Amino acid sequence: MNPRLPDVLPAHIAVIMDGNGRWAERRGLPRTAGHAAGSETFRTIATFCRDIGIQYLTVYAFSSENRKSRPPEEVDAVYDLLRRYIKESLETMERDRVKLKFLGDIKALPADIQNLINKAEALSSKYEGCQCNICVNYGGRDEIVRATRDLIRLSTFEEMKAIVEDDFQRHLDTAFLPDPDLCIRTGDETRLSNFLLWQLAYAELFFTKTLWPDFSVKELAAILRGFSKRIRRYGGL
Ligand code: IPE
Ligand code: IPE
Ligand code: MG
């Protein structure tokens, strides 16, 4: 049975997919088994979002801090899952018709993953309807610093003195994307952990105790119903 959906849906959903490690540990499994299960959940949720007409889905898969601070074996296991995910997506692309984009400091990833990313982005660029942005080696502060460097490199001194928010936005990884309307964090933590610091300025935030591998279409539908009841004021009345 299809879950009940509200009339008004967000155009852009952001998700902090947290809790994979604890999901595995509670089952006596290695943490990497949690990441593998989480990757399945992501496919299910992304397909559902496409089916119900969500225009943009942006997920936090792996942070720049994760890359620096997790044991090398866990980083390698996440990279392997990413390779597998992209290869599978390349095979099912024509059926899924989802536009894939990868946000973050992609240049610091292993060369073969960068090649897979380039291929997946190029081949899926023709699809319209649903765009899925996967943040890997992503950090909000790092993104702001990279954008600032770009802006300085590409602007004259006079242009820099006249910078407005839109100029800055165009140098972020999310250039030309609308800001997320809704941000969901699973895994029982109520923080942003350096996710989309600029873009979430007016997003509606939802936190759930559910660990990411257990997150379901049913729970997403309930959050969407909650979202439709929120009143967004953007500083107005
Ligand atoms: C989130 O799950 C996914 C990644 C950071 C790769 P965690 O690995 O942070 O899982 P927990 O928070 O330890 O349960
Ligand atoms: C945030 O989760 C990053 C991702 C979900 C990819 P973390 O598990 O890294 O966040 P902290 O360390 O608990 O803040
Ligand atoms: Mg975590």
Image (cartoon, helix red, strand yellow):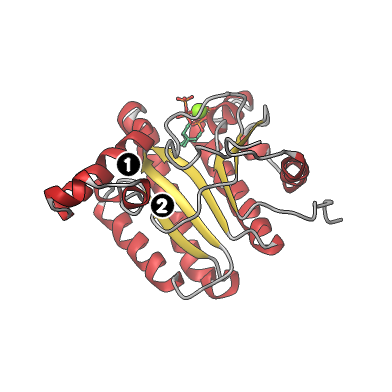
Q: Which mark is residue 88?
A: none
Which residue is at the front of the view, 107 or 84? 107
Left or right: residue 7 compared with residue 21: right
Furthest residue in direction front, as rendered: 237
Which mark sits nearer the N-terminus, 2 or 1?
1
- Image location (x, y in percent) of residue 231: 71, 39
- Image location (x, y in percent) of residue 141: 33, 34
Residue assigned mark 2: 174
Left or right: residue 207 compared with residue 4: left
Q: Residues within 10 Å of mark 1 (few under 14, many from 20)?
A: many
As drawn, 25 above or below 184: above
Q: Secondary structure at mark 2?
A: loop
Q: Secondary structure at mark 1?
A: helix
As drawn, 130 above or below 233: below
Residue drawn at x 67%, y 27% is 209
Furthest residue in direction left, as rendered: 157
As drawn, 26 above or below 59: above
Residue assigned mark 1: 143
- Image location (x, y in percent) of residue 151: 22, 49
Amino acid carrying mark 1 in the image: Glu
Residue drawn at x 70%, y 53% is 9
